[in-house]
Image: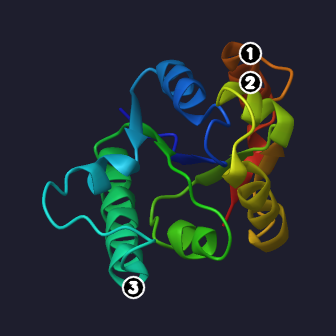
Amino acid sequence: MESEGVIVVSGIMAAGKTAVSHLLAERFQYGVHLPGSLFRRMIVSGLASMAEDPVAAQRQMQLGFRLACTAADQYAEAGFTVVLQDVVIGELLREFLDGIRTRPRYLVVLTPRPEVVSGRLGGSHHLVDELDYELHAFSPRRGLWLDNSDLSAAETVDAILGRLDEARFE
């Protein structure tokens, strides 16, 4: 069994990452859907919030990123194709991607329109515009940036697989 690499799926909240990542992983003979937030959710005591302790929260977030990248590399080394999903935007995206040793590596950034994201969240959400701005203004332009506003999760997966070469980066 040979891995086809690590595919990182990112985007702001409610961009469709979870459903798309799961369906994408299912398309491979040996596929793993690895939600990066899993490692931060494992903290049961002492979880820092950005509002109360941004330094500790940043440190915990970066720890979660390192653990996610290590787990992805380990699964890939065992022969699995890994779809690693997380909200990683801005300058943190570069650091996150550099933490993945496996080759080939792919990046897919889901970029639905802000009003679509707000609708998925049940109406206007104050963070949507801010996160969308940070994503577009400060994230490195690597990989495949895909507006999935008008696509179902399955159609998004088809689009990703059809354009996977565009998502590859070194």
CA gap, disc 1 and disc 3: 38 Å
- Residue wearing tag 3: 55
Badge nearest the viewer, 1 or 3: 3
Disc 1 marks a residue whose amino acid type is Ser
CA gap, disc 3 and disc 2: 36 Å
Image check: 28 left or right of 167? left
Sequence-earlier tag: 3 or 2: 3
Badge nearest the viewer, 3 or 2: 3
Point out which mark residue 42 bears.
none
Disc 3 marks a residue whose amino acid type is Val
Image coordinates for residue 56, horizontal then vertical, percent? 32, 80
Q: Are marks 3 and 2 in contact (CB under 8 Å)?
A: no
Sequence-earlier tag: 1 or 3: 3
- Residue at the spot 42% in from the left edge and 77% down from the top edge: 58
Badge nearest the viewer, 1 or 2: 1
| Element under disc 3 | helix
- Residue at the spot 74% in from the left edge and 39% down from the top edge: 164
- Residue wearing tag 2: 156
Image coordinates for residue 12, horizontal then vertical, percent? 66, 49
- Residue wearing tag 1: 152
Disc 2 marks a residue whose amino acid type is Thr
- At label 2, counting other C-alpha atoms closer than 10 Å, the crowd grade (few under 14, some 14-19, many 20 or more) is many
